[in-house]
Structure formats: C-alpha cells, structure tokens
Image: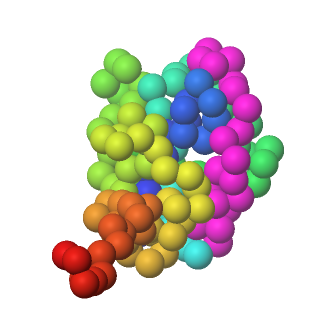
Amino acid sequence: MIIAVDFDGTIVEHKYPEIGQEIPFATTTLKMLIKERHRLILWTVRKGKELDAAVEWCRSRGVEFYAVNKNYPEENVDNGNGYCKVDADIFIDDRNLGGLPDWGKIYDMIINKKDWDDVYSEDTPHAKKKKKGWFW
C-alpha cells in the first residue's frame, strides 16, 4: 500500500519552521509500516533546508521514506514549488476531516482495513436499551 504522510502536526507537533516534539508513537508506527512493506511518501509543504531538516529528523529515528514530495524517488518534480500531488492509497494528515486519530488507531485502520465508520463506532458508547418493566 502507498501511504502519504504529512510532517508538521502529524509526525511532530506544529512548530514550523522549527521541528516540534514527536507525536507519541508516530515514528514507531511508521517503522512498523515500512517493515510490513508499505511504501511511505513524506508529503509536506516544507521545502529547502526545512524539508532537509524534516527528512534528516525522520532518518535519524529510523524512518526512511520511499519518496519525498513525489510519487517515486526518480520522479522529476520541477513545478516551481518543490512538491507535487502524489498518488497514494491513504493520506495521513492532521488536517483531515475529523482530525488526526492517535497513531495506534491509524495503524489498526491500515492493518485491519478499517474505515472511519468502524473507528467511530468503536469510540461511541452504545446506548443501553432500557429493560421493559412493570411500569413502562
């Protein structure tokens, strides 16, 4: 599976142009996905030295992306802004509708092929049915 992953607010807390603290279990989960042979693309608006810093930050924690801001490593992206629209099966981004679930839930969704309905139904306590008694 090809998975595009945002950096700021997804792997680390928002501190752009600095690099924020890691969001709990982000790199651990990404390494597990890589080990399970998923192709991860770093998909971020960072460019230049800020992008290099983000890639190095991930690399120093054992996360090596298949590609960065492109569909495959050899792709020539020269559109003036340093990144392109990537073709991925899943996009992990904090700006998602519904926000960013925790990384354990993200992993569970990917591995078990769950969708948002599955996740929300697990998080929503089911209303208990009232037992019919003598008076109602």
Q: Residue furthest front?
A: 135
In this picture the colour scheme is rainbow
Does the magenta portion include 96? no
Q: Looking at the picture, how far across and down is residue 49, in whole percent?
A: 64, 19
Q: Position of residue 21 (x, y in %)?
A: 73, 32
Q: Nearer the viewer, residue 86 or 17?
A: 17
Q: How many marks?
A: 0
In what quadrant of the picture does the C terminus appear? Answer: bottom left
In the rendered structure, the answer to whether residue 49 lies left or right of residue 95 reads right
Decide which of 126, 37 is in the foreground and name it.
126
Could you tell me which quadrant the N terminus lies in?
bottom left
| Picture quadrant where residue 80 is located | top left
Q: Nearer the viewer, residue 50 or 134?
A: 134
Rendered view: 76 above or below 15: below
Question: Which residue corresponds to the image point at 68% horizontal and 18% vertical from the top-left?
Answer: 18
Residue 120 x/y as whole percent: 36, 60
Residue appearing at x 22%, y 77% in the figure: 135
Q: Is residue 14 left or right of residue 90?
A: right
The answer to whether 69 appears left or right of 107 in the picture is left
20 in magenta: yes
Tell me where residue 111 appears, x and y as whole percent: 48, 75
Residue span colored magenta:
15-35
Near-viewer residue (57 or 11): 11
Give the vertical position of 47 relative to 23 (above or below): above
Which residue is situated farthest in the top direction here?
17
Relative side of 34 to 78, left or right: right
Q: Is residue 73 visible?
A: no
Please indicate, yes or no, whether residue 50 appears anywhere in the rendered image.
yes
